[in-house]
Amino acid sequence: MNKIKIGILSCASIAKRFVIPAIKQIPSFELCGIASRNSEKAKQTASDFETKGFDSYDELINSQLDAVYIPLPNSLHYEWIKKSLNNNLHVLVEKSMTCSLDQTQELNTLAQSKGLVLIENFQFRFHSQMAYIQQVLKSGKLGELRNLRASFGFPPFPDADNIRYQKQLGGGALLDAGAYPIKITQLFLGHDIYIDSASLSYPSDKQVDIWGSAFIKQKHGKLTSQIAFGFDHFYQNNLELWGTKGKLTATRIFTAGPGVKPEVIIETQEGKESIVLPEDNHFVNMLNYFANCINTKQSLNDEYHQNINQARLIGELSERAK
């Protein structure tokens, strides 16, 4: 099978630290170029990864590619996803996919019409700890699931001009940190859910929301989820599943990157058990999934549905918070 020729739009930290090294490990991909609006940065990053540097995003997506990875600021996602799809390129994009439900719906309709892969990069979906947690839940050890709680928050960023603080770049805690607990709620409660109530905090010295929370309910069931997120918090990165017979807590659910051995705590009437799981590279796993979707055309409709549902819930949370 021919290698998938992939290009990278931007020299973002997540690309350089995790995604590009993962691409280089996978035989099914060929890294064909890295683009930046800063010519020197593009050349340096490309040199670091033994590929070609491009002075513009347009130049890269008009080269001989099959796919692109887009880790640009949120406000630029819509433009460059659309241009990439119109160039018949498969797209892996960082979360959040766009800044509105309308934009996300348009892009997924376009991808579907062309039979192209469009995936929002929540790499934690593909970590082996998720499979372990699902297995524990399925085994009945926790009994029937009654409630989910998820938190993702961290201290303020040291640089005041961080893109996450800039409204015009699609910043804010909801589109960044809040997207994670919204996503994981769907993995356990299903897609037929809605935001019942929500809160977002907009400090007077910032243009964007800095922290928030929400209560999520099933439309045709009794299960609920409480989520919290933010940029000015004591660090939290947790999932809690509370059942009729026990409780499971994952302490590094969203960012158990290479070299991290995540811990899962299970509490039942028999006592408390701490399980340290093997490290895993969820970036490699995610990219292998992306490649499989490209090669087999499987799961495309499911991914379109997930993308749109995620954007719907983000929009609902923002509206409920008002």
Image (cartoon, grey):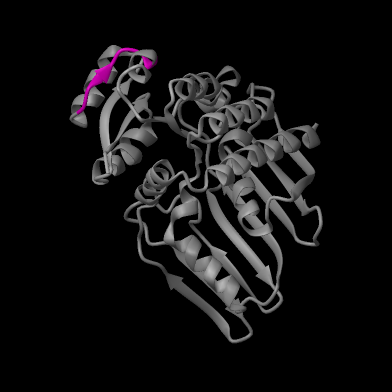
Camera-nearest residue between 124 and 234: 124
Please give the range of residues in magenta. Answer: 51-57
Horizontally, is 188 left or right of 253 in the view? right
Quadrant housing residue 127: bottom left
Q: Residue at x 57, y 47 (%)?
A: 152
Q: Position of residue 257 (x, y in %)?
A: 38, 51
Q: Residue at x 43, y 61 (%)?
A: 128
Quadrant housing residue 172: top right
Figure disc tally: 0
Camera-nearest residue between 265 and 67: 67
In the picture, the quarter occupied by the N terminus is top left
Q: Which residue is farthest bottom?
A: 270
Is residue 19 on the magenta stretch? Answer: no
Horizontally, is 201 left or right of 27 in the view? right
Q: Is residue 249 above or below residue 143?
A: above
Q: Is residue 249 above or below residue 74?
A: below
Horizontally, is 312 left or right of 165 in the view? right
Q: Position of residue 243 (x, y in %)?
A: 68, 72
Horizontally, is 42 left or right of 81 in the view? left
Quadrant housing residue 55: top left
Q: Position of residue 212 (x, y in %)?
A: 69, 40
Q: Position of residue 62 (x, y in %)?
A: 35, 16
Is residue 52 on the magenta stretch? Answer: yes
Q: Is residue 189 above or below residue 302?
A: below
Q: Is residue 284 above or below residue 158?
A: below
Camera-nearest residue between 139 and 237: 139
Camera-nearest residue between 159 and 197: 197
